[in-house]
Image (cartoon, rainbow, N blue to C red):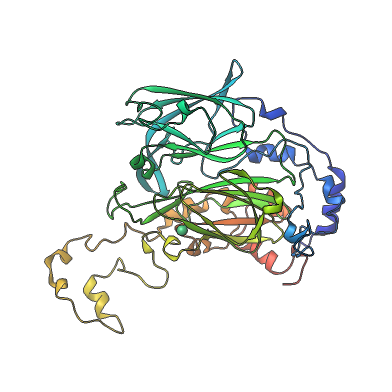
Amino acid sequence: MKIDVTRRRILLTGAAAAAGTLSAQWGHGEPLDASQSHKDSVGRSKNSNSEFSDYSRYRPSFGGPPDSDKYLGKLVPGFRSSGLEPVPFEAPDLKKLSWKMVNGVKEFELRCTPVKREFLPGQYMNVWGFNDSMPGPTIEAFQGDRVRIIVHNELPEPTSIHWHGLELPVEFDGVPGVTQHLIPPGETYIYQYDLHQTGTFFYHSHVAMQEAFGMIGFFIIHPRVAYDPPVDRDFGLIFQGFFIPPNSSTPDSMRMDWNWHTINGRSGPYTTPLACKHGERVRIRLVDFSPMQHHPIHIHGHTVWLTGTEGGRIPSSAWIPRNTILVGVAVAQDFEFIAFNPGDWTFHCHMTHHMMNHMVRQVGPRIRGEEDVSQYLNSLPNRPVAEPALENPAFGVPGYPQKMQDMDMSREMLEKINQKRETRGMRKNWHMGIKGLMTVLRVLPEEYFDLVMRSNDDVRPGAIFEAIAKGQYRTYRP
Ligand SMILES: [Cu+2]
């Protein structure tokens, strides 16, 4: 299946230059499904024929000196035309909060709830969140909107909700004691304010131990007209950490260390890959809501521009090219790039202990399931001095030392992971390299994007990687 990529692209670029716009400011209460709208909204950009036409979005290019607008694709637009509404935001594994318009106010309802969140297939953890989800559903709105958020406390203890990064009237800031009384269990509190900012914000409980239990959600405020250069995809990921004692499924929020990390409430390899088309301009918004851990997030195969923070959009003169972005607790970092490099690219926190939950094995086990401690020590090539503690009868008790909650991947777990549409066609054992705070960015040639994301046809595991590695979709020599 040799495809003339260049010719195909030229046809697409010409034919659909101004195709499709979104409905004005998404004027309805049901959240927009990005994959759906994208199908209709991606106008092939006229910009690609203008000043950036000599910059290829399909192959690596430095794009000239660092002061150039083309440097590392800095201001190179996506396929989407300028002057349109922003593309809908997309946070894998999370829903959006629906709203209704009431006398000119966008009204949302949030319920603070206990949640059973499936960190890994079949591994449900007891956390807290909103509307039965952790993180909670995304609030997505536009600059200039007036919003009313009706908060119902369905927790067994009082709470209050803070709108992180928003400049709003103090009585709606959500700080217990300082700006309001706590919302008792079973009660409701109404927050209402105007949105004059744009950017990556979030909402969270302002009770510290509840924050450590997971109570956060995205609050995305779009400009009415997308920033230039327009992006084709707008993804968001929330990083969290928990200490969940072995043989338990409930975090200990008093602990200052961690043993479980999640991205949008899933641990790798159950994190859902971010799928985009080869050549698109992509934005990814990162938020760290770990209680105690900062994360240097590293992306493979691409250099990215840091274009925003929880303080809003950064002027392009101050954008910074990065490959690893340190995201501190309660910080948001937005970055953008041209997805010029086809393939499945790992995208992860670079702290070794954050790349694995429970120190899961790859090179060596802590204790294998089929061994007891004595056998394990006896088989070590450099056996340490025997510890008298091993004679302790406690070692005869099943589950002691802790076996890290069955971190071996069962066939059922793998089936569930590979059932996701976004994982179709990845290499057979891809999950071996994805753990803890890790996910995958899939830059898919257009034909494969449609096959993976829109069709129900079979995709043989590894087929896409093989085609790319053979150079079928690369317009440059590896
Ligand atoms: Cu980390």
User: Is residue 457 in sight in this rendering?
Assistant: no
The residue drawn where x is 21% and y is 82% is 385
**Split into 4 quadrants, where in the image is the C terminus?**
bottom right
Query: Against 115, is 340 above or below?
Result: below
Query: Against 431, is 277 above or below?
Result: above
The residue drawn where x is 41% and y is 49% is 119
Across and down, in percent, residue 247 comes to 27, 53
Across and down, in percent, residue 287 comes to 51, 48
Comparing 199 with 379, the one in front is: 199
Quick one: which residue is furthest to the bottom in this view? 382
Across and down, in percent, residue 340 comes to 72, 59
The residue drawn where x is 33% and y is 54% is 256
**In the figure, residue 337 lies in which quadrant?**
bottom right
**In the figure, residue 201 lies in which quadrant?**
top right
**Split into 4 quadrants, where in the image is the N terminus?**
bottom right
The residue drawn where x is 42% and y is 23% is 189
